Image (cartoon, helix red, strand yellow):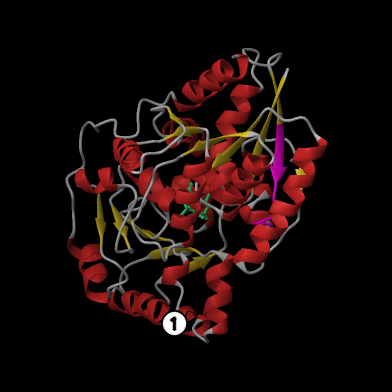
Amino acid sequence: MKKIVSVVGARPNFIKLAPIHKLINSNEYTNRFEHIIIHTGQHYDYKLSEIFFREFSLPQANYNLDVGSSTPCIQIAEMLKKLEHLFHSNKIDLVLVYGDTNSTFAGALSATKSSINVAHIESGLRSFNREMPEEVNRILTDHISNFLYPPTKTAINNLNSENIRGEMVNAGDISVEIIREAETKIRNSSILENLDLEPNEYYLFTLHRSENTNFESLQSVINIFKNISDLKIVFPIHPRTVNLLNQLNLYKKLQKCTNVKLIEPVGYMDFIKLLKCAIKVVTDSGGTQKEAYLLKTPCITIRNNTEWVETIEEGWNILTGIDVEKTTDAIMNWNPQKPSTQNPIFGKGMTSNIIVNHLKRVLDE
Ligand code: UDP
């Protein structure tokens, strides 16, 4: 029996973990693998962490490192110290990491330093903006991973152009199967009724990236809301954004925008229901850009670059930065035609199968 460890710590990690855990624990693999989940504690709020374990029926993590929030270096250092200890006291065959968070990079580095093979799910994505903390996490993780699962053609090209050392497997994006399953479950969500909303009468808004949470950007967001004061906005607000708005004395100003329904972050099924039924989504989230594509909801990305370039090429996503005029104009006037069929830019929904099959092969060798 081979021991596979998944290191996770933040909301987007838990969502990607779900199908992998389910498959590793299915009858097909049950006598081959033991799956150990390590939660670093990077996200610890119920609505950013435990809610996803419950919704996706994930077991409680085998270990919680409780690192909590801190500066990035202290957070990563704490993770490294605790992970190294765990890796040395358990005989582990492979470490799986997901996406681009500090937990992703810490998991990959401590595994490599403990001579354990690393496999990176969602590798090869690049924004080509080194000021973005996630970009550094991705590049470093990719270059020390033994096995890489890029989700798109662009990601494969990025890895090729960086002469990556590890073995690459074209796996598609794990979101396809996650969204497919979510679409069968969202009819049980009562989020629209709870918020007194009808489908197609509101815009969904999310914002949490560090480059967008400085005073100037947050002030621009408030100005965008003022420009569209007759449109309904639903804004599930990340605790990080709330803290910064408070620190910068902007939260009260935001609350004065009466067209904006400020709500706490919601669980996955409620979020997907909100996204599917929105007129458009305005976001700086990576995951939400692809989910919007898969759900055929037009996406306005308030960043200057994106890793998900295929969604732009397909005409379903546009970049406006946090530019007040461009964003206001896109919200009011950009109306892409809904495609009757979509190109499978994220693969065919077999990603977890491709990955776990590949792991079986390399671990059997
Ligand atoms: N999400 C959620 N509830 C919310 C907001 C987002 O479940 O209130 C999900 C969303 O569907 C996506 C993921 O969280 O899958 C995105 O996480 P985040 O924006 O924190 O990270 P990123 O994708 O930018 O790395």
The residue tagged 1 is 215
Q: Which image quadrant is residue 345 in? A: top left
> Residue 37 lies in magenta, yes or no?
yes
Specify whether 59 is left or right of 128.
right
Residue sitting nearer the eye, 286 or 197: 286
**For mark 1, does the 10 Å Cα neighbourhood hold few (<14), some (14 to 19), or many (20 or more) residues?**
some
Specify whether 227 is left or right of 17.
left
Q: Is residue 20 visible in the rendered structure shown here?
A: yes
User: Which residue sits at x=71%, y=42%?
Assistant: 38
Amino acid beneath label 1: Phe
User: Does 181 sit above or below residue 239?
Assistant: above
The residue most toward the right is 89
Residue 242 at x, y = what percent? 55, 73
Q: Is residue 62 visible in the rendered structure shown here?
A: no
Query: What segment carries the magenta color?
Result: 36-44
Residue 152 at x, y = what percent? 34, 36
> Residue 259 lies in magenta, yes or no?
no
User: Does 54 sit above or below residue 355?
Assistant: below
User: Which residue sits at x=75%, y=39%?
Assistant: 87
Residue 199 at x, y = what percent? 37, 50
Residue sitting nearer the eye, 347 or 146: 146
User: Which residue sits at x=34%, y=34%?
Assistant: 346
Residue sitting nearer the eye, 321 or 70: 70
User: Which residue sits at x=50%, y=53%?
Assistant: 137
